[in-house]
Amino acid sequence: MRIDSHLPGNWLRTDRARLPGEGPLYRRLAGAIRDAVCRGEAGAGSRLPSERDLARSLGLSRTTVVAAYRLLREEGLLESVRGSGTRVAVHRSVGPAVPAADMPALKLPERPPDGVVDCQSSVVPDLGGVPDEILNVTAGDLRATAADADYEPLGLPVLRAAVADHYTRLGLPTTAEQVLVTNGAQQAISLLFTLFSRGQGVIVAENPTYTGALDSARAAGARIVGLPVDEEGVKVGALRAALGRTRVQLLYLMTAGQNPTGAAMSTERRHDVARLVAAAGVPVVDDMTLADLAFDGRSSGPFAATAVGATVVTVGSLSKLFWPGLRVGWVRAPEQLIARLARLKVVADLGSSHVGQLIAVRLLPRIAEMAATRREQLAVRRDLLSGLLHAELPDWSWTRPRGGAFLWVRLPYGDAEEFARLALAHGVLVLPGSRTSTDGSFADHLRISYVAEPAELRLAAQRLSRAWAAQGRGSSAPGLSA
């Protein structure tokens, strides 16, 4: 059995102040470790931190950690060998560890306690502006679809045609044969990374980038290399150097509404990037899931429309504009690539839900209308949160985002991972910058979402201010009061 040499830094997802359960501290710590094994954060053979290191990271005494490890060894969950440290017992039927991932830490656990303001989400939590008749799929609709379609692993023909028409209107001529429907953009990215990472391929991405893309690369066994970004996107010099020294299989970019920085690639930068990748023969994934949320309302359109001579794969989704539970996304790519991706998708799920696809067909013509509504909502909330944080936390800094759903905040000192735990104790969920990084950098940054309602954003700013003051005092003050 393969032995994992280490666990991700956030594998317990807790600290002393939030150890679950009741009773002695060592039993609560043992429970947290047990839960981590059940979640798949630590698999059979995974080596746990030393007693001293775990005690230091959680702010506990070494005696507490020793007692917790001893209890779990008595249960048979852990085993210790002199010189090899403490590991999850290999004879336990818990399976291997799942590759270190950040998005499951955001999505899988139970909902935050009542009263916590979620400043991690990227989706406005409502369907306002969508008429009920669009969402009503009738029995007749379902019977007609069932009579005409099987699994349809590439997607319902009517939806593939609608996506093709959408891109054609945006200046990127597209046929239905160039479209693969997926279960959200996340599956699209996972399929692409799985395909291009074969043979230990190298995937180059922006740094920082979308946490779900990092998770997909790790799960696919790819080596991921990060490149710096500025307000116009990935830096051309860094890309040129990476293409010159590394055998790159795939380049993953967000040319508009970059997550988490909000950057948008200029026309000149697009041409420079296109020339580089075309000369190198490296395909590009342009993740456009946040592209419609450019605050000036002037989207540059699909990168593929201007990248002459380059192979560009465009990923899209309806989740950010309409509803995350819809789980309808797509890949727009050359037909030969669509055929390869379709083979992988068939193995994964045979095909996406027809019900969601029928709703998506009705929503696609309303993308421009809904994008305008979302931009208006988010621009107001961006400016509100920016003003509040400037007033409450004047030593924090960020660049005004040109699009998207986040402030990319730099802290003047301290570790963002530690502060995020303290912020949660004060009732606010924020994302540490290191979770968005290909190499663990940006430990002094926070990604703070402004999709919440204005009243919640006001509360979040107050709580973040109190948490920051508590960090400066070297203490925590749990509680969800206003």
Image: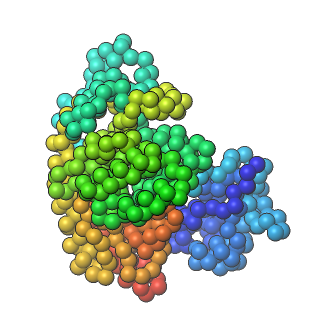
Location of residue 249 in the rendering, given as x and y in whole percent from the top left corner: 51, 47
The answer to whether 371 is drawn above or below residue 437 in the figure is above
Residue drawn at (28%, 16%) of the image: 140
Residue at the extreme top of the image, as rendered = 147
Q: Nearer the viewer, residue 27 or 385?
A: 385
Furthest residue to the front? 279
Foreground of the two, 213 or 234: 234
In the rendered image, residue 308, in percent from the top left (x then y), is placed at 31, 42
Quarter of the figure with the C terminus = bottom left
**Which of the pair 308/6 is nearer the observer?**
308
Q: Quadrant of residue 179?
A: top left
* Identity of the residue drawn at 43% across and 67% down: 433
Horizontal side, residue 353 vs residue 368: left or right? right
Specify the quadrant of the image occupied by residue 137: top left
Residue at the (16%, 52%) spot, across then down: 297
Q: Residue at x 67, y 52 (%)?
A: 43
